[in-house]
Image (tube, rainbow, N blue to C red):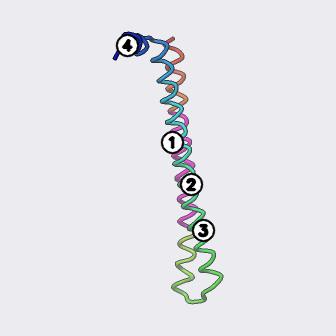
Amino acid sequence: MNIDETEILLDPRETHRSEVMALGRTVMANERTFLAFFRMALGLAAAGGGILQIWEHPFLRGLGITFIAASVIITAMGVSRYLRRKKSFEQVVALHASER
């Protein structure tokens, strides 16, 4: 490592920029996780709806209803998790801003 790289690493402005970039990556990861929850719920709802449309067997109808109910629960979990994480990120940003 030469002197120029060392000065960049020790520069407080660079540290702040890297913290902002890390927070940005974390926020995007949170959004990807929410979309994964939503994708799973959508798949379960589609499977449940398909089962209900195609088969008349009582067990399979119960399975279809269970899939749809699970999709609602997974969506609620995903939204809840996303909003809690988003709020904590906003608190970190506010805390960081108050320190400056």
Part of the protein shown in magenta: 69-88
Q: CA distance from mark 2 to mark 1?
A: 18 Å
Q: Quadrant of residue 57?
A: bottom right
Q: Quadrant of the N terminus?
A: top left
Q: Which residue is mark 2?
A: 76
Q: CA distance from mark 3 to mark 4?
A: 54 Å
Q: Gap in Å between the C-alphas at discs 1 and 4?
A: 30 Å
Q: Which residue is mark 4?
A: 6
> Residue, x 54% and y 80% (percent of image)?
62
Give the distance between the C-alpha atoms of the residues marked 3 and 2, in whole angstroms.
Answer: 13 Å
Identity of the residue drawn at 51% across and 48% down: 33
Front position among marks 3 and 1: 1
Report which residue position mark 3 lands on.
45
* In the depicted structure, whether residue 88 falls above or below residue 69: above
Name the secondary structure under disc 2.
Answer: helix
Residue 84 placement (x, y as % from top left): 52, 40
Residue occupying the point 58% across, 69% down: 68
- How many numbered discs sit on the rendered protein? 4
- Lower sequence index among marks 1 and 4: 4
> Could you tell me residue 94's position as x and y percent?
54, 22
Using a 10 Å C-alpha cutoff, classify the residue at mark 1 as few (fewer than 14 neighbours), some (14 to 19) or many (20 or more).
few
Asked if labels 4 and 1 touch by Cβ distance under 8 angstroms, the answer is no
Q: Amino acid at mark 4?
A: Thr
User: Nearer the N terminus, badge 2 or badge 1?
Assistant: 1
Select label 3 or label 4 by which is in front: 4
| SS assignment at label 3 | helix
